[in-house]
């Protein structure tokens, strides 16, 4: 069994492991740089030191998990702030630095936001990893071309609906995106994560987000997988990965080098998730500028 130090731990994860009567913990899924745990049907993540902080996540001083033969349903125990992962890893939780996700506030007064959004939008279309954003892609099969058309159409309808449609109608437009697209977290879900984060940012007065956001997240639970649902749930609460918080800061007040750097970091999230979350954020912020909410 390998001894490993915990580097940082999110407040949600910390609260669970501090419980005196911790329920049964099992491994939900295993990937190269992450292990997802199930605690009473809620997802928590142990991740490698190569990744940034995130909600309900603990970072540990290890590069990857491929050498440890961990499997779904393996048991995990916690005793005296040591976590035994299937008798293969012993994680010292006492070394973990607490971390909490906190979205930045919308800027007040004159800011570079409009210019930064235009830059980020052009950058994503040119360099982003989500092929469906580019209508002229000739290398995709007819199936993926049609999926891309549906994603472009439905994301546009959703954003227009914030202006022209009632809440119920726009909840249904959001539901048409849930589960749509490629990836462990489907493209439509990732776009919605970005929109939810834009709505949840502090000092955002353009749109009251509570009713729409709460309905979308509640209904999404039955339509998508638990990993994707967790991202939607935390986004609605205004919580996301550290790199995305830093991207928002750079959009609100950063210079060109800061924007480029943070866009590059967020693009590393998943195969295309970082691109699609960012696209949702950009569309949300552009909408607020359009209706004069900043």
Image: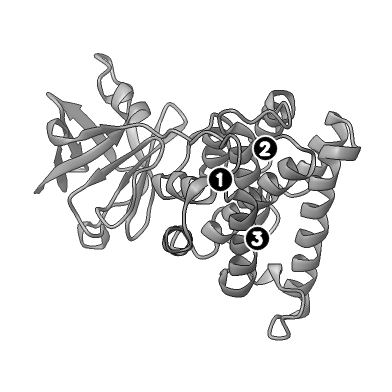
Earlier-in-chain disc, 1 versus 2: 2
Residue lying at 88% horizontally and 31% vertically, measured from the top left: 166
Residues at marks 3 and 1, CA–CA distance in whole angstroms: 28 Å
The label shown at residue 220 is 2
Q: Quadrant of residue 165?
A: top right
Q: Which residue is mark 1?
A: 228
83 lies left or right of 52? left
Q: Is residue 70 left or right of residue 259?
A: left
Horizontal side of 252 relative to 92 (left or right) equals: right
Q: How many marks?
A: 3
Structure colour scheme: one colour
Say which residue appears at 29% left-offset and 20% top-offset: 22
- Write down the residue under mark 3: 118
Q: x, y percentage for residue 238?
A: 53, 32
Q: Secondary structure at mark 1?
A: helix
Toward the bottom, the furthest residue is 139
Question: Do tag 1 and tag 2 residues touch (Cβ < 8 Å)?
Answer: yes
Splitting the image into 4 quarters, where does residue 272 fall? bottom right
Tell whether 68 sits left or right of 294: left
Disc on the earlier residue, 3 or 1: 3
Work out whether 83 lies above or below 32: above
Residue 57 position, x and y percent, is 35, 39
């Amino acid at each position: 069994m390998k001894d490993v130090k915990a580097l940082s731990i999110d407040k949600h994860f910390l609260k669970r492991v501090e419980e005196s009567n911790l329920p049964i913990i099992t491994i939900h899924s295993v990937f190269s740089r992450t292990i997802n745990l199930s605690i009473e049907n809620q997802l928590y993540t142990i991740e490698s030191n190569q990744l940034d902080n995130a909600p309900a996540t603990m970072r540990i001083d290890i590069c990857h998990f491929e050498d440890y033969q961990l499997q779904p349903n393996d048991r995990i125990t916690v005793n005296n702030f040591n976590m035994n992962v299937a008798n293969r890893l012993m994680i010292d939780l006492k070394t973990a630095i607490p971390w909490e996700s906190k979205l930045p506030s919308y800027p007040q007064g004159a800011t570079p936001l409009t210019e930064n959004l235009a830059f980020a939008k052009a950058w994503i279309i040119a360099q982003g990893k989500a092929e469906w954003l580019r209508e002229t892609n000739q290398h995709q099969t007819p199936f993926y071309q049609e999926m891309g058309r549906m994603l472009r159409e439905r994301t546009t309808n959703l954003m227009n609906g914030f202006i022209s449609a009632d809440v119920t109608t726009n909840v249904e437009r959001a539901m048409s995106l849930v589960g749509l697209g490629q990836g462990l977290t489907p493209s439509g879900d990732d776009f919605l994560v970005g929109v939810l984060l834009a709505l949840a940012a502090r000092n955002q007065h353009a749109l009251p987000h509570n009713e729409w956001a709460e309905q979308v997240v509640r209904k999404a639970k039955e339509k998508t997988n638990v990993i994707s649902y967790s991202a939607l749930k935390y986004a609605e609460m205004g919580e996301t990965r550290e790199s995305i918080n830093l991207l928002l800061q750079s959009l609100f007040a950063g210079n060109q080098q800061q924007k480029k750097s943070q866009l590059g970091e967020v693009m590393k999230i998943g195969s295309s998730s970082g691109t699609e979350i960012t696209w949702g954020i950009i569309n949300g912020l552009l909408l607020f500028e359009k209706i004069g909410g900043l």
